[in-house]
Amino acid sequence: MKIAIVCYPTFGGSGVVATELGLELARKGHEIHFITYRQPVRLALLNPNVHYHEVNVPEYPLFHYQPYELALSSKLVDMVKLHKIELLHVHYAIPHAYAGYMAQQMLRDQGIHIPMVTTLHGTDITLVGKHPNYKTAVSFSINKSDIVTAVSQDLKEETYRLFDVKNEIHVIPNFIELEKHRNENHIACQRSVMAKKEERIITHISNFRKVKRIPDVVKIFYKIQQTIPSKLMLVGDGPERLPAERLCEELGIVDKVIFFGNSNEIDSILSYSDLFLLPSETESFGLAALEAMAWSVPVISSNTGGLPEVNVQGVSGYLAPVGDIDAMAKDAIAILNNNETLATFKKQALEVAQQFDIALILPQYEKLYHEALRKS
Ligand code: GMT
């Protein structure tokens, strides 16, 4: 099948999922065309079935806002015609589903019928999409999609609750490529760079936005390190990073926290981690938690959104209400306190992650692609 994948090329979860999905589809013999404004961070163009087409938005002083949707929909039309693409898979409703619908209409005018699959990732629904300024267009583009998927049952329910959506929403959870985690060659940096032998390594990875509750991450760690010799690895960058650095200073734990910024060493860091913290305000899935679990790292998270569908209470880790720093620190200490308990949780975290292996998830997308092609 020839498939165009539209996504955000950044470190965000939706871009990562879209890229890994495209790469795996290409490995299975599909021809994949990534269409976006920059080469996606996890995209290595070493596969003859993978193509990347950049969307350029020419700057013009008249425009206060440069019209990305316009450029994207034009690019989609051109690439569909040039490469005989059969299906559009857009990740993140705003503005991708909207631009995809426009491309479909332009192509229809030229006698080309191409179906569109839209995958909802979370913030396009729960944070940004529900804003009154976007809601009408988001509802419209979801309803106009031939197939709609959501990355968790919770996100599906939220979409029906917040929008006037008539379509069926199929739940296809995010996935992990477990083979990769068995390949030791990925481990580049040394554990000794992060912590002493006797110290536990605690990690958080995100885009450092308000929704991730970074101060909670720091405060939970502050409590943990009072009982357990440990270090905190903070990976990622965003508006909450600077306040977090200040908070570490205030709490006197600067020497126990490493800020990595946006790193390509995520696999190495996770491979040495003993615990992952994700106390988010909301999280439609929590891909970072799943990535940690795939490296046998137990998770302490909030019990919000789709997180309980990924992190299983008392099995892969523990969940607590948003903002309950004391409970999260107490649960973390319970896991880290002795080697046997930690080993049990590590083993269980991996077992839960195995249920999200890409080999189980990919066929679910392929099935829906065939359904979309039949419909169009
Ligand atoms: O978490 C973010 O702020 C990034 C955002 C995105 O769109 O890339 O992540 C969302 O999609 C991920 C992939 O499906 C999910 O794992 C995240 O839970 C979701 N984020 C939120 O719902 C806050």
Image: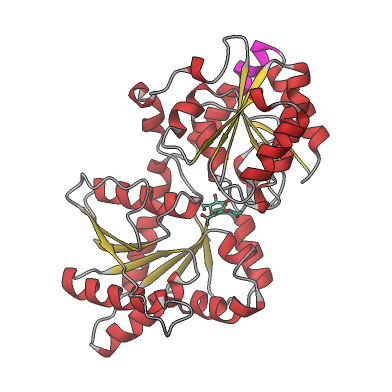
- Residue at figure coordinates x 33%, y 75% from the top left: 58
Q: Can residue 298 be seen in this view?
A: yes
Q: Position of residue 37 (x, y in %)?
A: 35, 63
Q: Position of residue 29 (x, y in %)?
A: 21, 50
Q: How many dots with numbers?
A: 0
Q: In this view, does 163 lie above or below 89?
A: below
Q: Is residue 208 above or below residue 294?
A: below
Q: Is residue 266 above or below residue 236?
A: above
Q: Nearer the viewer, residue 226 or 289?
A: 226
| Residue furthest to the bottom | 109
Q: Which of 336 and 223 is in front in this view?
A: 223
Q: Which of the 4 quarters of the picture holds residue 82?
A: bottom left
Q: In which quarter of the image is the N terminus?
A: bottom left
Part of the protein shown in magenta: 338-345
Q: Position of residue 240 (x, y in %)?
A: 64, 48
Q: Nearer the viewer, residue 180 or 323?
A: 323
Q: Quadrant of the C terminus?
A: bottom left
Q: Which of the 4 quarters of the picture holds residue 104?
A: bottom left
User: How would you classify the magenta stretch by its main secondary structure?
Assistant: helix
| Residue furthest to the front | 61
- Residue at figure coordinates x 50%, y 68% from the top left: 93
- Residue at figure coordinates x 36%, y 27% from the top left: 186
Q: Where is residue 5 in the image (x, y as percent from the top left)?
A: 34, 61
| Residue furthest to the top | 198
Q: Can residue 376 be seen in this view?
A: no
Q: Which of the 4 quarters of the picture holds residue 214?
A: top right
